[in-house]
Image: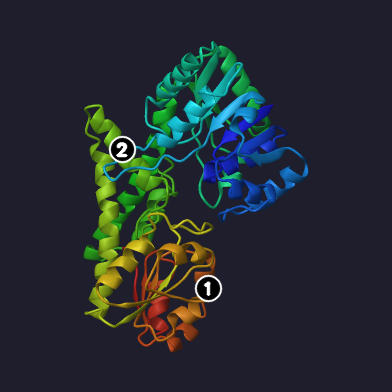
Amino acid sequence: MKICVVGSGYVGLVTSACFADFGNTVVGVDIDREKVKQLNKGKVPFHEPGLDELIKNNIKDGRLTFTTNLKKVVNDSDLVFICVGTPTHRNGSIDLSYVERAARNIGESIDGYKIVVTKSTVPVGTSKRITGIIAAALKKRREKVKFDVVSNPEFLREGAAVFDATHPNRIIVGTESTAVRQVMSELYRPLYLLGTPMVFTNCQTAELAKYAANAFLATKISFINEIANMCEIVGAEVKDIAKAMSYDNRIGGKFLHAGIGYGGSCFPKDTRGLVYQSGAAGYEMKIVAAAIKVNEEQVKRFCRKIVSQLGTLKNKTIGILGLSFKPNTDDIREAPALAVIDFLQHEKALVKVFDPVAMALARRSVKGVTFCRDAYQTAKDCDALLIITEWNEFRNLDLARINKLMKKPVIIDGRNIYNPGEMKKLGFIYTGVGRG
């Protein structure tokens, strides 16, 4: 198939590369000329394991290219995917301006039947909105062109997006057209060999399904963090509780890792978005709202632990290991580390930081901190060392060396990657999350 992907951000690039790898001819479209130029050289603007190699291979094989010429690509394509950003305002409402612009540009360009597929995370009713925008653009041109709008939400985990795109748990397609179902089934046919289930439903259901999935996972994280907070009060061990819960196959063990809380571009945005949408529809989403509140409090609770260990933070040197919101990505959007840095700077502490891949992005937005070359330079002369992101390289540090380098051997572990008993034997004053 010939596919046009509008938007070359995180979702757009993974979608483009993986569809090209399935044997389709894919053209990614972006308005940023320099970005397009770099992409055609195989240079990916963010860190995602395996994506750069996938893009380079498919460019080399002639299945993947990038351009700024939307009109030509749209009319040469069978399917047009909208993969643009949908940022959330502080009140939880979704900014659909990029989606609307894409829809308007498509309506101003198409000269024959097209299937327009929305992969961006969008609120319920957006497919109808896109349909209206395209129809209005065609009417303005006095053109009668048939088209269908499909909702096909993505479920990509940052740090594992290529695997998720090629080995998905499920494919959800929102359409009421039998013909479109056949086309989408053919598009995803390479996944049939893996037994990937396809769920066909209407657009509204497909749109809401993405929010429901992310809100549930975020709630699961907040739930175990509440249990962890209880553990700290009564002297229980949250890791053992999570392990006991995981043996119940109705619950499972994933997303039961207590810590400093979730961040990133999806869970915060989608939980707030779902609460806003439900309110606009006249329903109060109490459980999801509570999950958001618990997550916000979790970072504050972590910051109180720093004060509890050190007292006043003025002129104290604090080291932070991990800036990205999770391992295997350089994404620092709504990362807990940023909130901790804000708190420390407000308290007049001196902050040193290190992250294996997120340093370049952090330098653009994080000011007033010392960027270090590794964990050991970060730990040197610190009054406390904070573990914020569970990168593998932080799991096997030379702890004896860390202890000697620090002014005070205080470690506050926001991801519970070390054993409290062993840390105390090594001479550390160690604090985790939910460790009785």
- Tell us which disc is closer to us: 1 or 2: 2
Position of residue 255 relative to residue 400, above or below, is above
CA neighbours of label 1 inside 10 A, class few (<14), some (14 to 19), many (20+): few
Marked residue nearer the N-terminal end (1 or 2): 2
Residue plotted at (24% across, 59% down): 230
Q: Residue furthest front?
A: 141
Q: From where the camera sits, is residue 93 visible?
A: yes
CA neighbours of label 2 inside 10 A, class few (<14), some (14 to 19), many (20+): many
Residue type at mark 1 is Asn
Q: Secondary structure at mark 1?
A: loop
Q: From where the camera sits, is residue 167 visible?
A: no
Q: Which mark is residue 396?
A: 1
Residue plotted at (50% across, 70% down): 394
- Please give the count of numbered marks on the rendered protein: 2
Q: Which mark is residue 93?
A: 2
Q: Position of residue 66 (x, y in %)?
A: 65, 41
Gap in Å between the C-alphas at discs 1 and 2? 42 Å
Q: Are marks 1 and 2 in contact (CB under 8 Å)?
A: no
Position of residue 26 relative to residue 45, above or below, is above
Residue type at mark 2 is Ser
Which quadrant does the C terminus fall into? bottom left
Position of residue 49 relative to residue 83, above or below, is below
Q: Is residue 178 left or right of residue 205?
A: right
Residue plotted at (41% across, 21% down): 128
